[in-house]
Amino acid sequence: MMQFTESLPPSLHQQVSPFSNLMMNKNSSTNNQIQRARPWPGFHTPKNLGNIGDTNCMEQLLVHCANAIESNDSTLAQQILWVLNNIAPPDGDSNQRLTCGFLRALIVRAAKIGTCKLLTANLNHSMETHKFSIIELASFVDLTPWHRFGFTAANGAILEAVEGYSIIHIVDFSLTHCMQIPTLIDAISSRLEGPPLVKLTVAGATEDLPPMLDLSYEELGAKLVNFARSRNVMMEFRVIPSSSSDGFSNVIEQLRVQNLIRPENGEALVINCHMMLHYIPEETTLLSNRFTSECTTNSFRTMFLKAIRNLDPTIVVLVDEDADFTSNNLVCRLRSAFNYLWIPYDTVDTFLPRGSKQRQWYEADICWKIENVIANEGVQRLERLEPKSQWVQRMRNANLRSSGFSEEAVMEVKNMLDEHAAGWGLKREEEDLVLTWKGHNVVFATAWVPL
């Protein structure tokens, strides 16, 4: 593993410094007032609090704080925030760091709607997310199965689907900037019938979503083409700037035009979706379909999947995180996110030491996700995960059927997991694969073909 030598980013504790400043500047009488604060709704006796430092209590405090912020009860919100700040240090255990991330997100939300001005006056609203070099990002995603699981499962399904084709057109909707592609190129280069021509079309998202890269897609494409050439594979690279906010319509439109001249039997069309589709808005509204000039009551997700199906792809692979962040109710979203995002905080202890820069980068990206889910609404709320069951229904409604994964592909995933901590697991749900951590669903992988 390569060593990272860049300077340390600001700590999360520095970003939440208004709490410590507030506590240091308060005189004793004010502190006494805080200690004598009126009880919170639902906590009628000390017994109801349980152990104030355990995870369930932290979750309940966050929920009560969210309700106070939404009802504009600044006094109650400040009391709970003060307690949370004392029991959830940014350098504590995994549950404390998780709670600290939600604490900061609630402060940002309070600042946006005008609640708790005392605590938000000096808050630094910017998230210090890291921009990775290619080598850094490649090393970063190799640290954990979070992305490698999807890479391995998807590549296994893709290789089987494109067997015998002389041209393979891969359309990559990926959060990880083509980090999956080199391994796929390696496998393709060793085909018995010889390597095919690979066309790689990348949906270059116009939104800044972590993990972020420190070079342009044109530079990335040049590196991928050179890598493919070193494996005796000819590659054509194209990036299409496109936004998830309208269902990547620029990519879809250009693919439609290109599909009109696609050879009937000689070119495989692969649609690879890796943790990117949940950024497409899921709300059902009256939309104008630019491809049919009709107005329909649909979501952009539905329109995207139907447009993909109409391209008659050879295979569609969908990998995403198995959680539900779509509720319009803040408390529901908070509970769902809290009961899912403990997993990356828990797993990080198995592969990154305390105080390492990589760990700070990793947790800063999680904090970005938490803040986006909790502090934002409307078009600013980009993180809109849906569970596997919902995506499966969407794919079926788009006239796609599950093609599943072969035993060979499953074995590749199992071999990959053997390289990581014992808490990671794999289970099969019908024809789909699910990555688990200590028995909890984390990421799912599905493969689809047209009906």
Image (cartoon, grey):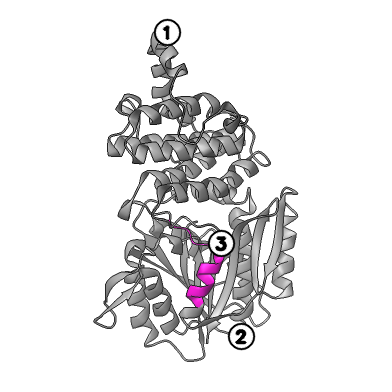
Look at the image and give the residue range highlighted in magenta: 384-395
**Label 3 – label 2 distance at C-alpha:** 21 Å
Kindly identify the residue that appears in the image at 55 percent across and 84 percent down: 166
| Structural crowding at the residue carrying mark 3, measured as other residues with C-alpha within 10 Å and reported as few (<14), some (14–19) or many (≥20) | many
Q: Can you give x and y, in whole percent of width and height, for residue 179 in the image?
A: 54, 58
Residue 105 appears in the picture as rendered: no
Secondary element type, mark 2: loop
| Structural crowding at the residue carrying mark 1, measured as other residues with C-alpha within 10 Å and reported as few (<14), some (14–19) or many (≥20) | few
Secondary element type, mark 1: helix
**Label 3 – label 1 distance at C-alpha:** 57 Å
Identify residue for label 2.
164
Q: Can you give x and y, in whole percent of width and height, for residue 66 in the image?
A: 41, 40
Quadrant in which the N terminus appears: top right
Please give left or right for residue 395 compared with residue 53 in the image: left
Q: Earlier in the sequence, mark 2 or mark 1?
A: 1
Figure disc tally: 3
In the drawing, what numbered circle is on residue 262?
A: none
Identify residue for label 3.
180
Identify residue for label 1.
28
Is 9 in front, or is 371?
371
Q: Quick check: is 387 in the magenta stretch? A: yes
Secondary element type, mark 3: loop
